[in-house]
Image (cartoon, rainbow, N blue to C red):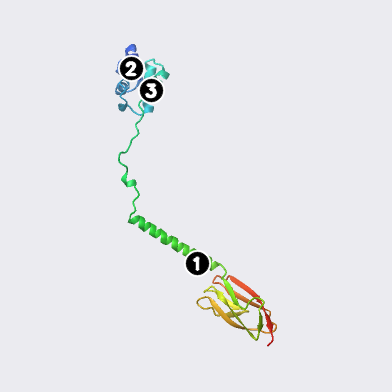
Amino acid sequence: MKTIGEVFKIARAKKKYSVARLEEITKIKSNFIDAIENQNWEALPNFSTTLGFIKSMAGALEVSDKTAVAIFKRDYPPKAQSVNPKPDIASKFVWGPRLTFALGVTFIVVLVLGYLGVQYVKFMSPPELKIETPGEGESVTGKYVVVSGTTDTDAKVVVNNQPVLVSPDGKFLVGLEISLETREIEIKAIGRSGKETIKKLNIGVNSE
């Protein structure tokens, strides 16, 4: 089975063309023509360009274009895949001071943002309010009733429009003056943002 180089050599001999004459007709450099006839693929350009040379030479030498292309594709060696015998050491993961610093900064930023987020949500939310005494519907005897409970440490407490002191731990206690007509106690906790939490307790007042 003839190679593409042998096919072109035979066809050129029949046409009595020298390499120089074939170069003149096809405008392909003589060293490329020699490389094709001797199948010196390393001396030729890339596959697409060499394929163009094959078609031009086939036309000049009156060789079947399809046949020439088919033989060339059969003879043309596949490109060897370059294999790096030594892995790229630089591509290995290395834990260094820069990475430690970057992770540390990222952690601090996330921590600060998380804290600010929690504080913002807390600031914009109504304060918590828990009433310990009196209980709902409780019957009270006397002129005073003790109102106590807990709220946020930065909240203000008002009981029946009377400001109440809140301790640093959020607890409050006040002796509220009542009368026989008192039926309801309103406890209001007001946060820094102005949001309010209101609880109303129904009580019964008994005469002494």
Q: Depth check: 206 or 96 in front?
A: 206
Residue 32's spot in the image, x, y percent? 31, 23
Label 3, label 1: how many angstroms apart (C-alpha)?
74 Å
Query: Looking at numbered disc 2 in the image, what kind of residue is underneath it?
Result: Glu
Circle 3: element type: helix
Residue flagged by tag 1: what amino acid is it? Gln
Which residue type does callout 3 highlight?
A: Arg
Q: Earlier in the sequence, mark 3 or mark 1?
A: 3
> What kind of element bears circle 2?
helix
Q: Earlier in the sequence, mark 2 or mark 1?
A: 2
* Image coordinates for residue 20, horizontal then vertical, percent: 30, 18
Circle nearer the viewer, 2 or 3 = 3
- Of residues 82 and 140, the one nearer the viewer is 140
Label 1 packing within 10 angstroms: few (<14), some (14-19), many (20+): few
Which numbered marker is on residue 119? 1
Q: Say which quarter of the image contains residue 18.
A: top left
Mark 2 sits on what residue?
6
